Amino acid sequence: MVLRRQCWTICTVGVVLAHAIVAMSAPAGYARIAFADLTQLALVALAFSVMVANAVRNRGQTRLFWSLLSLGCLLWGTSLGGWVFFEVIQRREVPDLFFGDVILFVHIVPFMAAVALRPHRPREEKKLDSTLNFLMLLIWWVFLYLFIVFPDEYVIRNTPVYSGNYDLLYQFECLMLLVALGFLTASVRGAWKTIYWNLFIAVGLYTWSSEAINAAISRHQYATGGLYDIPFATSLCWFVFAGLRARGLLPATEPATASSKWLALSPRLAMIAILSLPILGAWSQFIDVAPPPIRRFRLLVTLAAMLVLGAFVFLRQYLLDRELVRLLEESHKSLENLKRLQTQVVQREKLASLGQLVAGAAHEINNPVAAILGFSDLLAANRNLNATQLAMAQKIGQQARRTRDLVSGLLSFAQQTPAEKLALDVCALLQRVVQMKMLHLETKGIRVHTAISTDGRQILGNTNQLMQCFLEVIGNAMDALTEVGGGILTVSAKNEGTDVVLEFSDTGPGMVEPGRVFDPFYTTKPIGKGTGLGLSATYGVVQDHHGQISCHNREGGGAVFVLRFPTVDGAGSLAPTHEKQSVPLAVNEP
């Protein structure tokens, strides 16, 4: 790559020397014109080839950057091809009204779009669509050409005015590109600084040489192949060198300074362009001293540009609104996931804290409770007690037994350890549990509806622990339905992706606080009927099985418990899971 750049440096020196020798020694005529036109066209074609090669070997925004530069070189070559057609093929002077002038004027626009793209910035920091930016930029410059240059070119022909306006507008366009490249060169580092710096030099040489050539043409001192073509040929060589220099670099996205200013530049320029249109329209209607046909043409062009640019602005706003809605939806999902994770962490901390407390206190409590229960039974068996004393002794024994059951539940909860897990058909296990409880449920006026899939998909689990979980959830539903004199319990099991989802839904009164049902000691049952540890233990078992459990109230009344377990593949290992879609824990449903 270094050798290639060195060879091109030598070629550049040769091209410049050849132009200088021809300009100073060869007489003005066909041979000198043909040499200059064909050499310049070849240089632009080479620059186009280098830019295309750079676009092919890159990706993303960098590829688009070099593609836009390639487009600019293609338009540039088309304009020079017109000079070759007239001066070399037809052997006559280029006419004053030359179609290539429009193409030459437009060829700077892709260069501007490439600079505005700023490929050194990370892709996610670009908020506006690059295609819209390019189209709006193109339309704006075409409007300026039609407003300033075109009327004196085609509406009412006035060659001196047309040539002067064209030269001024074209130089302004080149200077805008040069200033933008200067800002980029000063604001970035690394490989992109080298790329922008070489493009800045090439554009600077071209701007200076173009101004010198236009001034010489206006003084009738320019001849193709003369001294004025030397800096022009040098600028073309530097464009090729800029492309070759970039091939030896590995430009990467990097944060640039003052990003907020750059991000706000595009909408501000669009706003300035839109606001300038009515001002120019008013000027052409009330202040312009040009003939009426030119004034009418300028007013029509202004109205057309207002319609087109206005449509693009509305389209841009529409795209921005859609992007904002998408970001809001993602933020909402992120907030829900954060709440879910926060609730799971809090719930686990509660269970861990309770387990530590119980492990240290349950055994100490159990011994005195056993003694109280034993002495109360002995006291109640004493025949010498009167009725009041006997009733008191029995109440002491009753409360001692309740305390013993509570301590037993605490010990069972605190001593949860990961049990041995095997691949099992959880749907078949759920079907068996429902059949076990069916008779008991029917005696309490509860109808059971089942919709359990039987495709044989398996999970890694412990049969006894999972049965206890299912019995606990069904038992809670049975207690709730018994309070209202019966109802319907619906049990379903289905596959969702790589998960098995079990759902228990009843038509009871629902949960008072669905977000607290898994908290230790939380219960809405009467005193003496529940300890509030059953669902907490169920939560721990489900988490130990790499699953999720959630609770919410139905819109039509009743509570819904959802259990989700990952399935296993044929080798008995957990299948890869995707984002869970179950109801977030501890988030109350409407």
Image (cartoon, grey):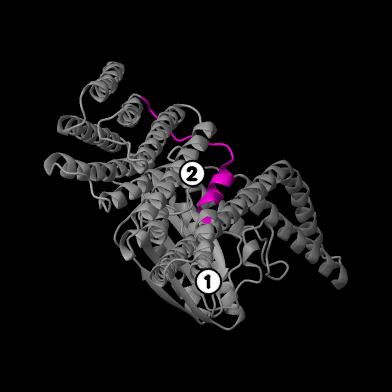
Q: Where does the image place residue 544, in percent across and percent down from the top left?
A: 51, 47
- Of 285 and 292, nearer the camera is 292
Q: Where does the image place residue 220, in percent across and percent down from the top left?
A: 32, 40
Label of residue 286 in the image: 1
- Of 404 and 334, nearer the camera is 334
The magenta stretch spans residue 319: no
Mark 1, residues whose alpha carbon is within 10 Å: few (<14), some, or many (≥20)? Answer: few
Mark 2, residues whose alpha carbon is within 10 Å: few (<14), some, or many (≥20)? Answer: some
Label of residue 419 in the image: 2
- Direction from residue 522 to residue 7 in the image, left or right: left
Is residue 347 placed above or below 182 in the rendered structure?
below
Q: Amino acid at mark 2?
A: Ala
Is residue 109 placed above or below 45 in the rendered structure?
below
- Of 229 and 463, nearer the camera is 229
In the picture, which quadrant includes the N terminus? top left
* Residue pictured at 33% horizontal, 39% vertical: 66
Q: Which residues are magenta?
A: 249-267
